[in-house]
Amino acid sequence: MRKVFLISILATILVAGAGYFMSMPASLPASVLPQDYRGDTVNGKTLFYAGGCGSCHGSPKGGKCDHPRVENKEILAGGRCLKTAFGTFFVPNISPDKENGIGRWSKIDFANAMLRGVSPRGQHYFPAFPYTSYHLMPIEDVLDLKAFMNTLAPSKGRNKPHELDFPYSMRRMVGLWKWLYFDHKTAAHRKTGSASQLARGRYLVEGPAHCGECHTPRDKLGGLRRDLAYSGAPAPGGEGWIPNITPHKTGLRSWTESQIADLLATGLTPDFDSIGGEMVSVQENLAKISASDRAAIAHYLKTLKPIQGLKRPKKKKSSAK
């Protein structure tokens, strides 16, 4: 019995030790930064709107945290909330304010947040922050984004801690989640030089625009189901459905590339209906990037594998009282 007990203790220590090391934050060294790179604010502005930074980090209209619209997309005071099955996430201030925002962050601090999901204090960020897509951005683009954000107005908006259920509130557990779902080794930390329309569209969709974060369903631990990529999913807040954007008949099969690009520019569908929900803000952002970038996004979406996706739940009938 004593031998069994000792083996059990040893096994527990080994498992705990493995979990400890597997869950450690993995930061980038400062040596990955290109020397004397100042940042291109014009490109940074494109990435800012492609990524919809202001739609999440702007202050919600009327002060109601779950309001889908924000007061000003270039005042990054934070304050919005995302209610999920894991608890409520509160979006932080990422303005250049030095007290409540990210005004004191260095270039490598910003790069680690975007590409590794690690804070300046060496803690994991929860994947409600879509670094699982941003990590595909070359480091020059990350620095361009930071350069543009530095030009925006500082805001004194105070950050509010997340209200998450146990054990999801344990940041160290995010390290194990990353081990399962976040392959940061695929990150392209240098520009490839590819200028093709397909490459540009793929980069925007999979990287800064992080389309898959909403249009791809997730499993019970919040990991993206890559086998159903872009095929539609329940809305993150629990109400509504994010549509299929693959070329399947339940998605964009009947749409031309021009019609997709026009939707991103105007918010109007081919039958002159208007989009709604969270997509309104997304479309407003994408209307601010170049027509060639919108065309590249449309082109890439039409090359995706057609996937039927999950069956949408039936709408509940309202009972009259």
Image: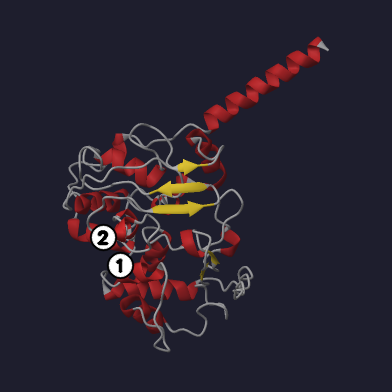
Q: Quadrant of residue 97?
A: top left
State the residue in front, 256 or 63: 63
Residue at the image position 43 percent from the left and 37 percent from the top: 124
Q: Position of residue 308 (x, y in %)?
A: 61, 73
Along the viewing direction, whichever of 32 and 117 lies nearer the viewer: 117
Sequence-first disc among 2 and 1: 2
Name the colouring of the figure.
secondary structure
Closer to the observer: label 2 or label 1? Answer: 2
Spot the residue most to the top: 2
Residue at far bottom of view: 271
Residues at circles 2 and 1 in contact by the CB criterion of under 8 Å: yes
- Residue reaching furthest right? 1
Q: Is residue 309 left or right of residue 149?
A: right
The residue at which mark 2 appears reads as: 73
Viewer-proximal residue, 270 or 204? Answer: 270
- Residue visible at 64% across and 70% down? 311
Q: Is residue 304 above or below residue 156?
A: below
What label does residue 263 carry, if any?
none
The three-letter code of the residue at mark 1 reads Asn
The answer to whether residue 198 is visible is no
CA gap, disc 2 to disc 1? 9 Å
Q: Secondary structure at mark 1?
A: helix
Residue on which disc 1 sits:
285
Location of the N terminus (image quadrant): top right
At which x and y percent is residue 278?
Answer: 41, 67
Q: Secondary structure at mark 2?
A: loop
Residue at screen point 41% across, 43% down: 117
Q: Residue 315, percent across and down?
A: 60, 73
